[in-house]
Image: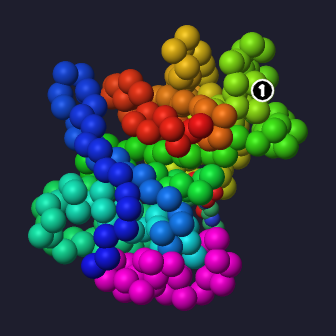
Amino acid sequence: MLDAPHRLIPLTLDREGAALRTIWGAMSLDEAAALEPHAHAYLAPEAQALLARLTVPARRAELLCGQWLVHRVARAWLGDDTRARVGRGAFGQPLVQAEALDVPDVTLSHAGGWVVALAFPHGHPIGIDLERVDAAHVETLAPMLGAAECAPADHALGRAAALTQLWALKEAVSKATLCGLVVKADALALEAIGWDPTGFVDTRYATFRQYRGRAWVGSRCAFAIALPFRTEPPARFPWPELLG
Ligand SMILES: CC(C)(COP(=O)(O)OP(=O)(O)OC[C@H]1O[C@@H](n2cnc3c(N)ncnc32)[C@H](O)[C@@H]1OP(=O)(O)O)[C@@H](O)C(=O)NCCC(=O)NCCS
């Protein structure tokens, strides 16, 4: 199968002294045209059926690149000789299908021309969100955040970046829990928000108390990860240049 340009990085997270294996991937959405002829090789039937229904080129590119990157992180997890395909779960979440004992779960997000995916152990839910920073979104984002979900007035990258960072934390937990944004907004409330001077923000979740979140932001994009609260998030986002 074609090998499109992409980046892969294994990251070991700490869970109360035990090593938790994750594999992260990133690629540009510009690779979609090259991947299209190979889609049948990495998409499970339900994902192929979805692709056939999609007519908007940008959305086709997201699906083609996103599922392919999921396939890459899963193959890196499983070993390159394991056959794997990427299907879809009941709520639209990506699923790895493979004949192997240790099949990882996966999460993915696309924004700003990039897709980021990661593979992690089944039974240890993780969700990620990559979100474009856009000053025009401030008016939309501000009312969707609660009164306690405050960003510092002197955030180095400005209000849009700070609000996007907080919003990405909500989307990330909505993916870890598989509920998406169909739940009532209150269900995704952040609490104990802590702004680290080195640039990331940590949070806990008022409803999903078993999770914690960490988010980074640049001038272009914010990235957030939500994961079980006893697991230490990575100290840094692997590709800060993607965030701008
Ligand atoms: C999940 C969601 C928050 C993602 O938001 P987004 O910022 O627009 O998009 P992102 O690029 O960050 O993530 C999209 C990816 O999340 C994954 N995803 C979709 N739904 C998901 C869910 N419920 N749980 C976990 N991951 C999900 C998919 O892989 C999707 O990409 P793909 O469709 O290309 O495979 C949003 O799409 C949502 O709320 N979906 C639920 C909608 C729903 O349940 N509809 C049911 C209608 S009855």
Q: Is residue 59 above or below residue 114?
A: below
Q: Position of residue 85 (x, y in %)?
A: 30, 74
Left or right relative to 9: residue 57: right
Membership of 8 in magenta stretch? no
Q: Residue at x 42, y 86 (%)?
A: 37
Q: Which residue is mark 1?
A: 159
Give the image quarter of residue 38.
Answer: bottom left
Q: Quadrant of residue 82?
A: bottom left
Q: Position of residue 103 (x, y in %)?
A: 22, 60
Which residue lies at the image location 59% right of the left edge and 37% below the top edge? 244
Q: The magenta stretch spans which residues? A: 33-59
Residue 52, percent across and down?
A: 54, 88
Observer able to see residue 238: yes
- Ligand 1 positioned in quadrant: bottom right
Q: Which one is nearer the viewer's eye here, 220 or 95? A: 220
Q: Of 239 and 21, which appears nearest the observer?
A: 239
Residue 233 x/y as whole percent: 38, 29
Q: Secondary structure at mark 1?
A: helix
**Measured along the vertical axis of the image, is residue 70 above or below residue 210?**
below
Residue 192 at least partly seen: no
- Residue drawn at (37%, 57%), measured in percent from left and top? 6
- Crowding at dot 1, Cα within 10 Å, few <14 / some 14-19 / many 20+, comes out as some
Q: Amino acid at mark 1?
A: Arg
